[in-house]
Image (cartoon, rainbow, N blue to C red):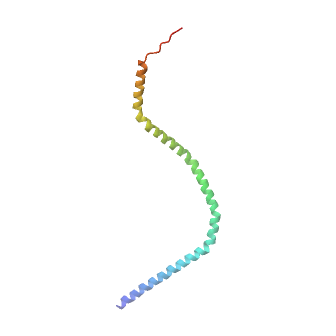
Amino acid sequence: MLELAALIILVLLAGAVLAAMAVALVLLKALLWLVLLPLRLVVYALLLPLIFVLKTLLGGVLFLVLAPVLILAAIASAAALLAAVIVPLLPLLFIVLCVWFVVRLARAAPVTTSA
């Protein structure tokens, strides 16, 4: 029984040590955050315009590279859409042209009188 009580006390002490170390680490992190805050603010103030310029340049280069590809893709998709609409109508167009040709042949040619 004495061993169990000693084991419980050891576990409680280990938990207390771990809790104390966690509190110490949180305090150290807060202290470092507070000490390094001015340095972070200066670095952000200096790097923010540089980041904006890099973002603009990278966006422009990507636009110059991808714009022709996107234009070609738009043309190809428009051609595919046009083909998808026209191809099913080709048999109907063939029938209409055949009827027109038959009607044109059956129609009498106009008579012209010479003076």
Quadrant containing the N terminus is bottom left
Residue 26: percent from left, percent from top: 53, 77
Which residue is situated farthest in the left direction here? 1
Quadrant containing the C terminus is top right
**Residue 90 falls in which quadrant of the image?**
top left
Q: How many discs appear? A: 0
Residue 84: percent from left, percent from top: 43, 38
Residue at 36%, 91% in the rendered image: 2
User: Which is nearer the eye, 73 or 6?
Assistant: 73
Is 80 rendered above or below residue 23?
above
Which residue is situated farthest in the bottom direction here? 2
Residue at 58%, 77% in the rendered image: 31
Residue 5: percent from left, percent from top: 38, 89
Residue at 64%, 68% in the rendered image: 42
* Left or right: where 54 falls relative to 93: right
Residue at 57%, 48% in the rendered image: 65
Residue 7: percent from left, percent from top: 39, 87
Is 61 rendered above or below residue 47?
above
Is 72 rendered above or below residue 89?
below
